[in-house]
Image: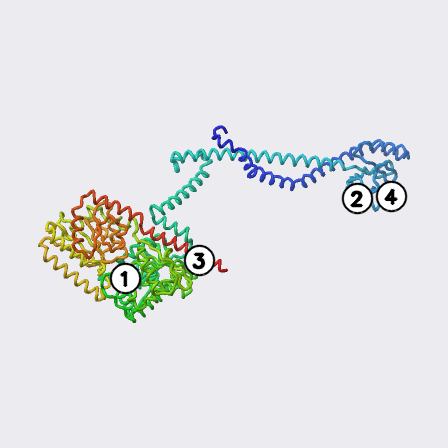
Amino acid sequence: MSSLPSGTRSHWPATLRRLALRYVLPVTAAVSVLALLGVPYLERLLAGWFRADVQLRAQLVMNSIEQPLGELLQAGSYARARDYLVRVTDDERLMGIVVCGDLGERVMQTAEVPGIVACSPENAIADADALLHSPEGPIQISRFPLLAGNMSWQILMVHDLGFIERRQSTARNFVLATIVIAAVMLALLVGLSVRLLVNRWIRILLGDISGGRYLDDARSAAESAPILRRVREAMREVEARQRLEIEFHENWTPQALQQVVRDHLGDCRMLVASNREPYIHTRNSEGEVRVQVPASGMVAAIEPIMRACSGTWVAHGSGSADREVVDRSGHIAVPPSDPVYTLRRVWLSEEEEQGYYYGFSNEGLWPLCHLAYVRPVFRESDWVQYRAANAKFADALREEAGKDEAVILIQDFHLALVPKLIRERGTKATIALFWHIPWPNAETFGVCPWKKELLQHMLRADILGFHTLYHCQNFLATVDRYVECQIDHERLTITHQGHLCNVIAYPISIEWPPRWLAQVAPAAQARMAVLQRHGIAPGVKLGLGVERWDFTKGIIERFHALEALFEKHPRWRGRLTFLQVAAPSRSKLPAYQALQQQTHAELERINARYGTADWKPIVLIGQHQEPEQIFELYRAADFTLVNSLHDGMNLVAKEFVAARDDEDGVLILSTFAGASRELLEALLVNPYDVGETAAAISTALDMPRGERQKRMQLMRRTVAEYNVYRWAGRMLMDVSRVRQRQSLETWTAR
């Protein structure tokens, strides 16, 4: 033991006590129980041996007295025969001898014979060996026939068996003492051996840990390898868990988010509801079914979460081939290449889609919530369809949730009525509604004719999430004006009809790193491919805009800024081409049709004014682009311009930063986009100030490589740390706390 540290030696008394409790006492108890159970058998065995010995001694005595006693009895010398028998019974174990006649009469006996020994026929002894219990103790009677001439007698030898009990007691005590001592010694030996062996294994394990040896190069002996392997596996599990806990604060990953779900939600069903579906099945011109990922910031944010956590996503089936690929319940496993969660499609009639989606949602709520100076349109027929569509989503969520508790994450303004509708259907769920677009001030929201109904339905959610604290405060002010309730401005909670709703800011983000980057070439190769594809000369600078074709995105203002740049800085004519991706959106609505027409008109005007035979100032890509194509454009661009007139967050800005692993490129970002509160290293502009935007483009083009790298490094660090897994993790941990508080309140009420 001298090899152990002194601190270890000082703890040996406690160690011995632990050894006694863990090994000595249990082993001693077990052996003692075993011994007590074996004592009766041992006593019976000893009794049998001793009785056999007594019978053998009786036979020897009978052999020695048979002739002399027979002669005395035949001669009638009873007095001499009696004296002879008295001398024979001097042995302490032989209590006495009885001589019986043929008719059972007692002929003679020695003085010490107990009274229960008789020669009468009714008490005759049938066996040669019998055991009786007299007041003096147990006795054994051995019967022998005696023949002398023509006369016969029965000789009864009475033996005292009291010595057997005395010997049994001595033997029993000796055996028990021997067993207990042996058990204690064995337990101490086993305990000390185990202790020494464990100490040896600990030294080996500590040596492996300090030397960084965990796997094949570990120095474990063959006999200890299985146990040490289990210890190492446990250590790796603990280390992985600790790493995930650290990542909760530093680097959120899909694994960290999965750990949050396991720790905080357990087996609770995860349901997501949104109008937009993550995968759309359509038929192309050749009649083939193809899968399309929609151009949607909401999809870009939520889809990685579902891939990490599984569950069911309930969405409107809008694709031309959506019905052909689902089962009877509207289910399909997605993503197509590696299914990990379920998409449940909700079917809407053409009338419902027109009123709910194009009408109330996009002609009413969308312009109402965005300060883009497009007049919102509210029609009662659209409101009726909006209610009907929300009811269909609530029914689908009830079916998917079943009777078990669920967590339901409702996405965006299309489904504002769903929280209350779910409650009315009796579904057990914790509900979070995230509003992906800005929330206007109270006066602006008052334009909506059904403002009170909308707010009351929303307040049935447990959590209402917005991108920024400013939007949360706008919502509180709106509720304060139009709904009778209790508002805690400090804690950002609203109590309405006994239900507590938490209003929380969750700045949304993207997955890190984006999975599409694995399919995209490095920046230099991507740039060459993009320039060749669009007929742009190699030395020309490349600007980029990626948007849905929407009036809130500032596409017209962007073109005017480019025009101002070419006018004020002619040196960039022929040296800069701006690629504008505008994915068609809501093309059935007059406002969007007008926007597309105006975009084409401004594009043709500017290109005609400044373009040449071999150079176009602006190239418009007016069709849907797959994510891999978008990320290729991000990597190819010298700068990306995000000049939204009003945006909840705008994930294009974050996607551009995530794509630039070469730490190059410049981001020009609108101050009216939520992302501007996080990406402070971008060039921030007022999108309504065309001159300021033009100056920012010029600055981006002239910015030195070192400055671009520093800015991009800082922005990439921000996006990596505050990614979508952190966004979802924070929300789900808040959901877990709400569930715990609700269960506590329920218990208190009982």
Identity, as a three-letter code, of the amino acid under mark 1: Cys
Q: Which one is earlier in the sequence, the residue at label 4 or at label 3?
A: 4
Place of residue 113 in the rendered image (x, y in percent of width and height, measured from the top left): 83, 38
What is the C-alpha distance between the residues marked 2 and 3? 88 Å
Q: Which one is earlier in the sequence, the residue at label 4 or at label 1?
A: 4
Left or right? Give the position of 727 relative to 193. Answer: left
What is the C-alpha distance between the residues marked 4 and 1? 130 Å
Judged by depth in the image, the label closer to the viewer, 2 or 1, is: 1
Q: Which one is earlier in the sequence, the residue at label 1 or at label 3?
A: 1
Left or right? Give the position of 487 relative to 659. Answer: right
What is the C-alpha distance between the residues marked 4 and 2? 15 Å
Secondary structure at badge 1 equals helix
**Residue at the disc numbered 2:** 126
Identity, as a three-letter code, of the amino acid under mark 3: Gln
**Residue at the disc numbered 1:** 369
Identity, as a three-letter code, of the amino acid under mark 2: Ala
Judged by depth in the image, the label closer to the viewer, 4 or 1, is: 1
Towards the viewer: 322 or 695: 695
Asked if marks 4 and 2 touch (Cβ < 8 Å), the reply is no
Towards the viewer: 461 or 691: 691
- Residue 711, located in which quarter of the rendered image? top left
Asked if marks 2 and 1 touch (Cβ < 8 Å), the reply is no
Asked if marks 4 and 3 touch (Cβ < 8 Å), the reply is no
Towards the viewer: 697 or 43: 697
**Residue at the disc numbered 3:** 742
What is the C-alpha distance between the residues marked 1 and 3? 32 Å
Pick out the residue farthest to the left: 613
What is the C-alpha distance between the residues marked 2 and 1? 117 Å
